[in-house]
Structures are given as structure tokens and as C-alpha cells.
Image (cartoon, rainbow, N blue to C red):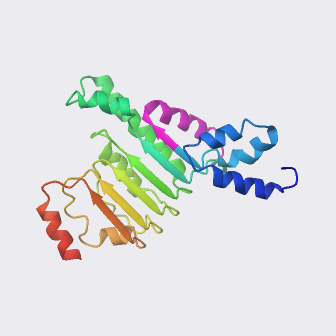
């Protein structure tokens, strides 16, 4: 190890840290030297689910200078698996506190996206809460994402419309809108994602209008 230069060690760590962030955190505990090498990659690849994890991440990110917040690959979900199971048992929020929680989830998820936006290359966004999905996805589509190449969204989504907000996006997977009629109209998608080469739309149900729209676009 002593025979390799710092640059090669950094390159090795960069290639190794492609999981949910656990590898970088573990490497940072090995020694002072490895800690220094691994520190720039602590947030390179992250998986974050639920309000608790989102809150902790925001606190950590906002204690760092922007150059140390380099998030390249992100899985972000507003709810944990337990949250999803719990909400499947009730059709609507049962208290004001639950509505406050939804607002907090949306706010913290939005702050994470803002911090990640300048360096983000791939994003999987799961928005299980029906009250959170439209405004949060709308906020995402309004953010400049200059490096984003792959995007998957699971949750009820509005359509991207801001011109060149996703200038390098090549792959887009949308799921959660049963009838996304209008997505392919007026050139809004092409304007927002000029480099888009792969589009997948899942979760359709009783969507004849969108089927006709898609047929016309082909």
C-alpha cells in the first residue's frame, strides 16, 4: 500500500464506493490516512429512506462546505418499508401531526435534492406519500441538474417543462401516474431533456388517451 501514490488510492476508493455509502464510512475508520482518502467519497453513493435518515443526512450535509457534498448516485425515498405498510392500513391521514410529518418529509427530501443537484449523476426517487409526490417531483424538475444522466421516479409525478433543466439526461423511467396524458405533447419533454434516448413509463392503467398520444408520437 505504501508504494502506491495518493491518486491511485483515491481512484480505488472511488470505484469501491458504489453502494449505499457503507463502504466509504467503513474505510474512513481504518486509519487516519485511509480516512483522508475516503472522506471525499463519503457521500458519493447514498441510499436514504424515511424522515429519520433524511433529517440526519441534511444535518451532516449542511455542516459541510459545498465542495464536500459531492453526491453522484442517490436513492431517496420519503418513506421506509414500515411506513408504507402502516399507511396501507389507513386511507387518509388521521391527525394533524401526520400532515406535519408529510410536510417535514417533503422539506427534508427537497433540501437533499438541492444539495445533491450540482453533482448528481443518477437518481432514483421514490415518493410514496400522495400528498408529497407532486410538489416534490415538481421541485426536482425545477432544479438545475447539469450532470444527471439517469433518473427513475416512482410516485405521482407532474411533467418536466423547464427548458434544458436536464441537459445531459439520457435515461428516464417514470412510474406512478396511471394516465400521463400530455407528457409527450408540445415538445416540453424534449425541451427539458434534449439528450433523452431512453424513456420508460410504468404503472399505466385505463390510459387510452395516453396510448393514442404515444402512438401519434412514434
Indicate whether residue 59 is drawn in magenta.
Answer: yes
Q: Residue at point 33% right, 49% down? A: 154
Whether residue 95 is situated above or below residue 143 in the rendered picture: above
Q: In which quarter of the image is residue 5?
A: bottom right
Q: In which quarter of the image is the C terminus?
A: bottom left
Question: Extreme right residue here?
Answer: 3
Q: In this view, does 47 lie to the left or right of 132?
A: right
Q: In this view, does 140 lie to the left or right of 85?
A: right
Q: Where is residue 200 in the image (x, y as percent from the top left)?
A: 32, 62
State whether the magenta stretch is mostly helix, strand or loop. Answer: helix
Q: Where is residue 188 in the image (x, y as percent from the top left)?
A: 31, 69
Whether residue 218 is situated above or below residue 175 in the rendered picture: below
Q: Residue at point 88% right, 54% down? A: 3
Q: In this view, does 83 lie to the left or right of 43?
A: left
Q: Which of 104 and 72 is in front in this view?
A: 72
Q: Nearer the viewer, residue 210 or 106?
A: 210
- Region of the chain picked out in magenta, as a range: 47-65
Q: Is residue 14 left or right of residue 180?
A: right
Q: Residue at point 23% right, 27% down? A: 89
Q: Where is residue 22 in the image (x, y as percent from the top left)?
A: 60, 39
Q: Position of residue 138 (x, y in %)?
A: 35, 52
Indicate whether residue 158 is drawn in magenta.
Answer: no
Whether residue 86 is situated above or below residue 121 in the rendered picture: above
Whether residue 153 is situated above or below residue 33 in the rendered picture: below
Amino acid at each position: 500500500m505504501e508504494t502506491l501514490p495518493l491518486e491511485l488510492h483515491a481512484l480505488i476508493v472511488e470505484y469501491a464506493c458504489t453502494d449505499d455509502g457503507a463502504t466509504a464510512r467503513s474505510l474512513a475508520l481504518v486509519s487516519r490516512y485511509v480516512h483522508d482518502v475516503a472522506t471525499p467519497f463519503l457521500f458519493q453513493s447514498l441510499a436514504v429512506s424515511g424522515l429519520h435518515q433524511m433529517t440526519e443526512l441534511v444535518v451532516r450535509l449542511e455542516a459541510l462546505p459545498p465542495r464536500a457534498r459531492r453526491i453522484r448516485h442517490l436513492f431517496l425515498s420519503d418513506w421506509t418499508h414500515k411506513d408504507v405498510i402502516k399507511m396501507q392500513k389507513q386511507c387518509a391521514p388521521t391527525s394533524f401531526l401526520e400532515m406535519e410529518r408529510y410536510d417535514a418529509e417533503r422539506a427534508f427530501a427537497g433540501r437533499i435534492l438541492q444539495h445533491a443537484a450540482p453533482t448528481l449523476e443518477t437518481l432514483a426517487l421514490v415518493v410514496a406519500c400522495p400528498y408529497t409526490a407532486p410538489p416534490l417531483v415538481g421541485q426536482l424538475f425545477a432544479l438545475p441538474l447539469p450532470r444527471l444522466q439517469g433518473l427513475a421516479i416512482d410516485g405521482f409525478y407532474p411533467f418536466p417543462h423547464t427548458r434544458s433543466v436536464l441537459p445531459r439526461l439520457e435515461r428516464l423511467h417514470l412510474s406512478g401516474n396511471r394516465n400521463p396524458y400530455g407528457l409527450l405533447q408540445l415538445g416540453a419533454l424534449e425541451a427539458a431533456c434534449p439528450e433523452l434516448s431512453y424513456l420508460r413509463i410504468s404503472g399505466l392503467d385505463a390510459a387510452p388517451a395516453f396510448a393514442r398520444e404515444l402512438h401519434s408520437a412514434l
